[in-house]
Image (cartoon, rainbow, N blue to C red):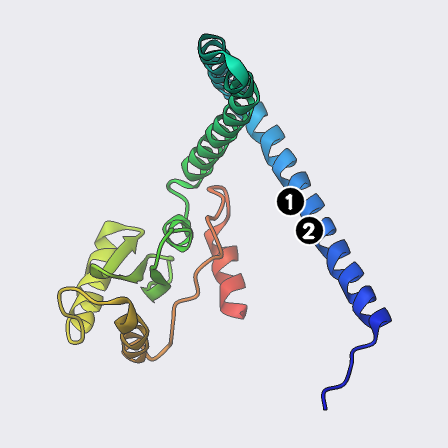
Amino acid sequence: MAKTRDPAATKAAKAEAKAARKTASKQRRSQLWQAFQMQRKEDKRLLPYMIGAFVLIVAAAAVFGVLSGGFGGYMMIPLGVVLGALVAFIIFGRRAQKSVYRKADGQTGAAAWALDNLRGKWRVTPGVAATGHFDAVHRVIGRPGVILVGEGSPTRVKPLLAQEKKRTARLVGDNITVKQMDSLESRLAALGTKVGPAAMPKGPLPAQAKMRNVQRTVRRR
């Protein structure tokens, strides 16, 4: 016979879970506010675009509500406020994302970081081949097949790409299904170099970072 859980323990567990959710929500709001403040200082067009979109949508909803009349007309104003706030938030998100990618452009590790943030069913393996200068080849597995992305000096990346392409061609056909992605990823990992995956920085490196110090740090890991 199954044991009956202590009501006090159940109540305590629910209270703890509720407190954890409340804390996580507060942290997300704090992070979002900090991101907004940083973006607002760097992007002078952010507030005009957000306010303009909000006012335009609310005004359009109000005009449509007046023309419609009745109860439905009154409901158009709060609906316009909600839609306006949503569009303003989307504008903030898009411009913040664009700003982040612009800052990362040209920095070592930026390509791997961008690939890790891909949306959809993609399997990303950064640094399947690399040089001591952080020139690297990253592998992406998806429905179209296997995509190899080079990062670094073209003269050093070109032979890395050719080598990895030759190795990958032994296993890959034209297209693959979602079910085949796991097995293909495992087989490609087995074909990796003897030294294993290259040690790549976790995200874009600042342009002023000294490469020798960075390489020394990576070798210690």
Between marks 1 and 2, how big is the CA–CA gap?
6 Å
Res 199 → quadrant: bottom left
Q: Residue 144 placed where, x, y %?
A: 20, 59
Is 155 situated above or below 31? below
Is 33 situated above or below 190? above
Crowdedness of circle 2 by 10 Å Cα count: few (<14), some, many (20+)? few
- Where does label 2 land, which residue? 24
17 relative position to 41: left or right: right
154 relative position to 173: left or right: right
Is 147 situated above or below 43? below
Looking at the picture, tell me which residue is in the foreground, 4 or 191: 4
Q: Where the N terminus falls, by quadrant?
A: bottom right
Residue type indicated by callout 1: Arg
Q: Which mark is residue 28?
A: 1
Q: Residue 108 placed where, x, y %?
A: 41, 49
Which residue is depicted at the point 24% across and 59% down?
147
Which residue is depicted at the point 49% across and 11% down?
69
176 relative position to 181: left or right: left
Q: Residue furthest front?
A: 70
Looking at the picture, tell me which residue is in the foreground, 193 or 28: 28
Q: Is the residue under label 2 in contact with that under label 1 (CB below 8 Å)?
A: yes
